[in-house]
Image (cartoon, helix red, strand yellow):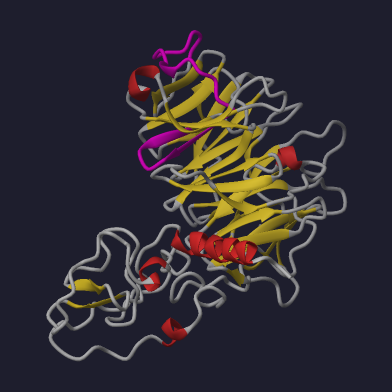
Amino acid sequence: MASPRASLAVTLGAFAILIASCSYSPHFVSGLTQCADSPPLCPGGFVCDTAAGVCVNSLSDNDAATDATHGDAVADHITIADAGADSGSTPDAPPDTHGPDAAPDAGCTANIATSSDNCGACGHSCGGGMCNLGVCQPTTVAGVTGATSISVDATQIYFTSGTKILACPKSGCVVQPFQVDDMGMGGYSTWAVNVANGNLFFMSAPTQAGTEHDDLFECPLTGCPSPAPIVGMAMPYGVNYLANAGDDVYWSDDQAKKTFRRACPANSGMCDTTLAPATVLNESISPHLLAGSAGTELYFVDAAGLQKCPYAGCPGTPPVPTPTVLTTMIPTGVVAYGGLLYLQFGDTSHTLNGAIRTCNPIDCYAMVPKNFIANRDPISGLTVDAQGVYWVEDTNIYFCPRTGCVGGPRMLAVGLVPGPNSGFNAHPIVTDDAFVYWIQDAAGTVMRIAK
């Protein structure tokens, strides 16, 4: 039997998890929703009843002051923030401060430590995953197997498997996956699928005689015509798929030593290939080392470090106009999001310290990017969205809010086993408003976890 000290440690550990990121749920109900752990403890117009540990109408007879010491009822310490998994729903309307409170949400009577539909906060669903101590656990996306790369939009998950591009509802396949495209018996494998701006892009090689050359394809989400349209191609060796930004797609050609851009109108599935693509650089940029910003600038990394050029590019030899060097540091990946550049560092030989740094696109804080997190193992798969920053480190996936990694990152998944061609997966981690998705193992099992 466990000792009293061990039992107490388990209990305190549970409370420590529940305390993390405390806030009130968007499903707010006066007199029932618990106070947050740090100011503001309750929404405007409400105060914390320190005895009961719940938010109450400030116009009621209750005269409790807002608690700023956190030294009272246990209930004041066990509300977890809604991490955004219910962001597709509409928050409850503000309570009527001049009349009786509405009936409480049914979910608010659930045990937020174990309820998969109310995990950590009322209305925060784990989407089929289990809830442990108020934290959602990873779950397998049913019916998705053999995946070599993945992408998601508002309703579907898209994945490459062999010569095919397949799609299923994000909750999993209950019937056979929808086939977006198949390169055919004489075709080559598909990889690096990416849904951007209502269009689907992927890498493969067309049926051909002689040396395989890898091309960049684009299709409507409803299915590819036959043959699938080629956005970018090169002979004899093929192209590198780099990035999307707004209507634009970027790729590079190692043989020609150039980097290109083409506009692909939203939701069209058909780029205008009658026009020659724009040459934006007279050098071939490697995958993960270029980021666009939807019509303003483009950012890239080469031996000179992180640089930027105007949207039109810096073609010519030497480049004209001359690229602006933002920092001489050489990251292994760059992501543009929310007015910042996020840079990943570290290599498999551990000659570089694993880190994520941020950089403003004007002067990169006078050419000295700021540390977001440092002193880590090599970082890869850097992904940024409205909720946070995600990355792969060793065989684990980590997360921190975009505001920073104070207190350390949250581990989302463990034990990732790279597939045989994992380097072809352009986006090892993909996200939507509610979930994080990844390929777990060499068998192509896809998993997700609620944010």
Q: Tell whether position 319 is magenta.
A: yes
User: Dividing the picture into quarters, in which one does residue 251 lie?
Assistant: top right
- In the image, what residue occupies the spot 68% across and 24% down? 350
Q: Residue furthest top?
A: 318
Viewer-nearest residue: 137 or 275: 137
Seen in the image, is 361 located left or right of residue 389? Answer: left
Q: Tell whether position 155 is magenta.
A: no
Q: Is residue 285 placed above or below 45 in the rendered structure?
A: above
Seen in the image, is 229 located left or right of residue 162? Answer: left
User: Dividing the picture into quarters, in which one does residue 78 lie?
Assistant: bottom left
* Res. 194 visible in picture: no
* Res. 127 visible in picture: yes
Seen in the image, is 225 located left or right of residue 444? Answer: left
In the picture, which quadrant includes the N terminus? bottom right
Q: Position of residue 150 (x, y in %)?
A: 66, 53
Viewer-nearest residue: 198 or 422: 422
Viewer-nearest residue: 255 or 106: 106
Q: Position of residue 416 (x, y in %)?
A: 73, 49
Q: Position of residue 146 (x, y in %)?
A: 80, 57
- In the image, what residue occupies the spot 27% across and 72% down? 50
Q: Is residue 229 placed above or below 366 in the rendered structure?
A: below
Magenta residue span? 316-342
Q: Residue furthest front?
A: 4
Q: Is residue 171 placed above or below 220 in the rendered structure?
A: below
- In the image, what residue occupies the spot 12% across and 86% down? 98
User: Dividing the picture into quarters, in which one does residue 337 lie?
Assistant: top left
Task: Tell how many labels.
Answer: 0
- In the image, what residue occupies the spot 60% across and 69% down? 132
Seen in the image, is 393 located left or right of residue 294? Answer: right
Q: Is residue 271 placed above or below 268 in the rendered structure?
A: above
